[in-house]
Image (cartoon, rainbow, N blue to C red):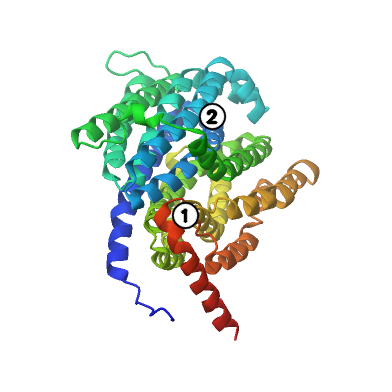
Amino acid sequence: MEQVRTPFLWGPFLKKLAAIAIPVALQNLLTTTASMVDTMMVAPLGELSVGALGLCAQFSSLMFSGYWGFVGGGMLFFSQYWGARDDRGLERSYGMTLVCMMTVAVVFGCLAAFAPEAVMKLYTDKQAIRDIGVQYLRIVGVAYILQVFSMAMSSLLRGTERVRIPMLASVASVGTNLFLNWVFIYGHLGSPAMGIRGAALATTCAAGVNVLALAVMAKAVGYPYLFRVRAHFQWDKAHLKEYFVKCFPIICNEVLIGVGNMVINITLGRQPEEVIAAVAVFRVLEGFIIGFFAGFSNAASILVGTCVGAGELDTAYERAKRLVYLCSAFILLGGLGILALHRPILTGMSLQGASYEAGLRLLCIYICVSVIRMGNWIQNDTYRASGDAVTGTVLEIAFMYALVLPCVLLSGFVLKLPYWAIFLCCYIDEPIRYVLMQRHLYSGKWIRPVTEQGKEALPAFLARRSMTRKKQTL
């Protein structure tokens, strides 16, 4: 018997999307605003300080790649178990995610604190920039551990649709960071003027405030899952196997892409000093776009993942299709907004002359490719939340290492092309992947539940999708 097709309810869908996406987007934009203000407050110290801060941020991005695979895997389980209302599954998944993320945090924190010279030597051959970056990394290593801990807590809260708590914690953290930057960098309220070291100290204190605020607010509203510590570690071999089988492709994706991005940053780090400063400022602006987008990406993961976990597979499929195009449209608007305000933003972060022209050119290139790039990103996040951690991973890694990196290295070290041509090579794979990801999206084969409700509903869903495809080919 053919299923009666029900109309898609846009009203409830958009309401849920806004309820999740807006607080997460605001949280990320607050964090990025703090990064921008950090750069502006360091800017009077000179372009070398701006460049050093940007290269230290690239090391933070490498750490992000190391732990983000566990965030993606954790969100898969959080959203599906939340949809199935499986408390034990939620708590167990959080414990495994937390242990894995903190392992990464400790490794990177120790590298920053105890081997900062080696880190900076990897990213640039400019000794003056290295010396400044070493001062920053020695202090900020502690912040890395606190930041990753707060990210684990925030991921669980978001995966269970408690998105306001991370947003409010970010408000407290960003406010602390801005105030302490003013105190420590330039020596106000009796503090010595610490320069770049003051920015690192302010970042560390703000990270501690974020963790404390998350814990206090979650406890105040009676949120149980963060505090059942014993339940977090009640694993067995079956649970560990299922977790790592699902997470392993995501981890490989993030780590290998992080290594690829490191190679790209090393290539750009060999450009003239004004280009290094422009890249550092661009990365902050890129963070604005990604931060805005991440709210919708999180919403997509939750809105689709909860439906998959609850066995509502047709609803998950219909939501996913619409989310891709909605999010791409929002990204275009956000990018155009930044471009319209580029002059005060770039000059406010100390770019002028050649560095200003370089920053504007990088921004224009990125906005042109960001719509397709973010479309790929949200499709991959949607697949992951639905249980398919392989397809997006294979495509992204294959194209990164077979196409992007060879083009970047060839253009940078062999052909000696201008920086903007090297930068353009970073996105040469995006249109090809978009076509392949769209084909997979419409197949519906990315829906792979981990809950019993989802598994029971899967055969009927796949049969309906197969029948639909046969009708479309006739």
Q: Are dots 2 and 1 in contact, CB under 8 Å? A: no
Mark 2 is on which residue type?
Cys
Q: Can you give x and y, in whole percent of width and height, for residue 257 in the image? A: 61, 43
Q: Secondary structure at mark 2?
A: helix
Q: Earlier in the sequence, mark 2 or mark 1?
A: 2
**Quadrant of the rendered image containing residue 86:** top left
Q: Can you give x and y, in whole percent of width and height, for residue 461 in the image? A: 47, 68
Residue at (45% x, 35% y) in the render: 97
State whether residue 431 is above or below residue 450.
below
Outermost residue, bottom side: 474
Q: Visible in this render: residue 337?
A: no
Q: Is residue 25 left or right of residue 46?
A: left
State whether residue 217 is above or below residue 300.
above
Mark 1, other Cα within 10 Å: few <14 / some 14–19 / many ≥20: many
Q: Can you give x and y, in whole percent of width and height, for residue 45 in the image? A: 47, 26
The residue nearer to you, when weighing 386 against 154, is 386
Give the position of the C terminus as an image quadrant: bottom right
- For disc 2, the marked residue is 56
Q: Can you give x and y, in whole percent of width and height, for residue 239 in the image? A: 48, 38
- For disc 1, the marked residue is 449
In the rendered structure, find residue 261 and report the number of the disc placed on it. Answer: none
Q: Is residue 403 left or right of residue 8?
A: right
